[in-house]
């Protein structure tokens, strides 16, 4: 059965196919294909209730590349009998590394010293040891825990906040103090957002909660853009109510060219790239295919054979 896919697999392996990249398909774009497919491989495409209703009875499974499924109306999918599958814990390690990279960049002032020296200057900038800083993690799931583990190794004081109880052995082992949101924001030098996007986290960071942060604090968002009210964040940064931000995700992606964030010296930006890891990507590619095949009732064993054949030789 998988022989029909052999030319496609081999073309990708030989870099003969370079797919055009669109950040996501919105509702209208998906509706144009409704009723024409039995299974879907998706990124952050907007599978709303309207789209799902138009896709049944043919659509059986949506296989999400990665972990977050906030772009899929799960209640509608369950009501319509459409399976929604993903890859839990897909990018925990690279995202946690990215958070620590941002913390180090701000604490040690590395990007700004580099810019000054390359521009011909010679400036000494105030910097901090991480052991002098407090980190607050909002969302102590797989990624939040990985961030806290890394921060503990640097000697940071650790605060956590979550809407679900966190295992006491993790809290004890890593010295995490679980606190209410306001307490975390009032005390943290760095605030890392690692929560899911859901009704309780939408615009969790807004004008009011930004007002609870210290004026010397830095906000880091590698979770989902709408967790932050972007207009409120821009206003807080412009007014100096917080010291800086590191943003990998945004309310609108790609980030509009006219966004003030693009012109702020105290903001570090990336194009939803915190998950960058070829090894992690490879695992997610194959797991996403397995989820699709399994959801369609197709045999998954041949995928392992193709995976072994296409694996690059070790150097």
Image (cartoon, rainbow, N blue to C red):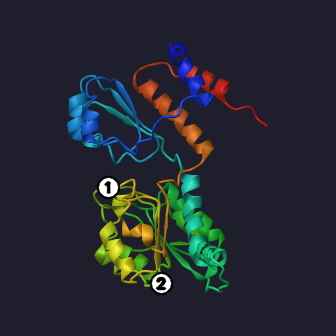
- The residue mark sitting in front, 1 or 2, is 2
Asked if 173 appears above or below 240 in the picture, the reply is: above
Residue placed most toward the observer, 65 or 185: 65
- Going from N to C along the chain, the mark reached first, 1 or 2, is 1
Q: Is residue 159 left or right of residue 228?
A: right
Mark 2: few/some/many CA within 10 Å (<14, 14-19, 20+): few
Q: Is residue 227 left or right of residue 16?
A: left
Mark 1: few/some/many CA within 10 Å (<14, 14-19, 20+): few
Q: What residue is drawn where x is 47% and y is 43%?
A: 66
| Disc ID at residue 198 | 1
Q: What residue is shown with label 2?
A: 216
Asked where in the image residue 228 lies, by quadrant, the reply is: bottom left
Asked if 290 appears above or below 159 in the picture, the reply is: above
Residue placed most toward the observer, 161 or 204: 204
Residue most toward the right? 315
Q: What residue is drawn where x is 76% and y is 35%?
A: 314
Pinpoint residue 266: horizontal percent, then vertical percent: 48, 76
Say which element carries label 1.
loop
């Amino acid at each position: 059965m998988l022989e029909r896919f052999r030319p496609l697999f081999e073309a990708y392996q030989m870099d003969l196919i370079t797919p055009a990249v669109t950040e996501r398909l919105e509702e209208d774009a998906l509706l144009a294909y409704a009723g024409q497919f039995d299974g879907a491989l998706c990124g952050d495409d907007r599978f709303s209730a309207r789209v799902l209703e138009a896709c049944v009875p043919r659509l059986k499974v949506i296989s999400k590349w990665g972990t977050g499924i906030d772009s899929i109306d799960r209640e509608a999918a369950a009501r319509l009998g459409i399976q929604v599958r993903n890859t839990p814990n897909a990018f925990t390690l690279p995202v946690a590394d990215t958070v620590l990279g941002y913390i180090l960049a701000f604490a040690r002032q590395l990007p700004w010293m580099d810019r000054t020296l390359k521009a011909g200057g010679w400036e000494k900038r105030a910097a901090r040891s991480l052991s002098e800083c407090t980190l607050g993690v909002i969302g102590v799931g797989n990624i939040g825990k990985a961030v806290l583990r890394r921060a503990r190794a640097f000697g940071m004081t650790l605060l956590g906040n979550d809407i679900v109880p966190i295992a006491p052995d993790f809290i004890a082992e890593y010295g995490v103090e679980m606190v209410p949101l306001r307490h975390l924001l009032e005390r943290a030098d760095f605030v890392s957002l690692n929560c899911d996007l859901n009704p309780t986290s939408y615009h969790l960071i807004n004008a009011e909660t930004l007002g609870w942060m210290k004026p010397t604090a830095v906000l880091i968002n590698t979770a989902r853009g709408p967790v932050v009210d972007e207009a409120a964040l821009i206003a807080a940064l412009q007014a100096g109510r917080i010291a800086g931000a590191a943003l990998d995700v945004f309310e609108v992606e790609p980030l509009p060219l006219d966004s003030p964030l693009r012109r702020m010296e105290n903001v570090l930006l990336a194009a939803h790239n915190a998950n960058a890891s070829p090894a992690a990507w490879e695992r997610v590619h194959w797991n996403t295919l397995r989820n699709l095949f399994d959801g369609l009732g197709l045999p998954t064993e041949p995928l392992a054979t193709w995976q072994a054949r296409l694996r690059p030789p070790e150097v």
